[in-house]
Image: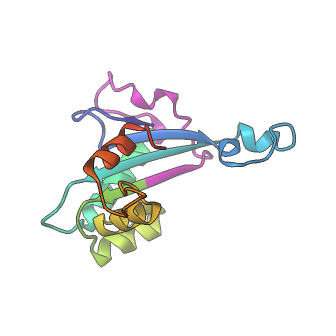
Amino acid sequence: SEKTRQTGDQGIDFVGTTRLGDLLAHPKKIFRLAHDMQIDFIGQAKHYPNRPLSPSTVRELVGSLELARSRHFSDKNFQLLEDLSLKSFSPVFALLITTGTVTAGARAVAEKSGIIIRSGEQIATYLADLGVGIVQETGDFSDEVFEDWMAGSSH
C-alpha cells in the first residue's frame, strides 16, 4: 500500500494491492487462479474530530474512483495509480475512514455505492480487539508498542 501526496491526489489518500492467493493458506499449484487474482484498494482518510462525515464526502470518493478507473486526472504528473489495474471488471474496494462520526445519510450513500465506511470509534474498536498497542503481560495500552506496530515491527 502507499499513501498519496497531499495535493493533486484526486481525492485519493491511499492505494493498495494484494493478490487473493496471498490471503489463502492453500498451495499455489492447487489454487493458481486465486494466486493470479489481484484486488485493488483505494481510500480516503478524513480527520474530522469535531464534525460528522457527510454524504458529500462519500460522493467525492465515488467520483474520484470513477476518474481513477478512466485515468482522468487534473494533474498529468499524478503517477501513483499507474500500477493499479483499475478497469471496469477489476475488483476494487473503496474505503472511507474518519476519526469522527458518520451521518446516517453518509452511511446510506456509502452502502448504495459500495464504499466501505468506518468511523473513528469503529476503527478504535477494531484495533483494540486485535490488541494493537496493548502490552500482553499487563493488558495496558502503550504508546511505544503502538508506534512499533505502526512501524511494522509487530505485524
Residue furthest out toward the top: 77
- How many dots with numbers? 0
At which x and y percent is residue 41? 49, 46
State the residue at coordinates (87%, 43%).
30
Quarter of the image holding residue 117? bottom left
Left or right, 88 with respect to 150, comes to: right
At which x and y percent is residue 127? 40, 60
- In magenta, the rendered stretch is 69-94
Q: Nearer the viewer, residue 65 or 41?
A: 41
Quarter of the image holding residue 50? bottom left
Quarter of the image holding residue 20? top right
> Magenta stretch containing residue 74, yes or no?
yes
State the residue at coordinates (37%, 37%).
151
- Rendered view: 59 above or below 16: below
Task: Pick the quarter of the image with the N terminus.
Answer: top left
State the residue at coordinates (29%, 27%).
75
Residue 68 seen by the camera: yes
Specify how the rendered protein is coloured: rainbow
> Magenta stretch containing residue 82, yes or no?
yes
Residue furthest out toward the left: 50
- Rendered view: 82 above or below 108: above
Left or right, 95 with respect to 53, comes to: right
- Rendered view: 37 above or below 127: above
Residue furthest out toward the front: 137
Left or right, 83 with respect to 95, comes to: right
State the residue at coordinates (23%, 35%).
6
Q: Nearer the viewer, residue 44 or 144?
A: 144
Q: Nearer the viewer, residue 94 or 131?
A: 131
At which x and y percent is residue 144? 28, 45
At which x and y percent is residue 101? 25, 70
- Rendered view: 72 above or below 137: above
For the stretch drawn in magenta, the main secondary structure is: loop
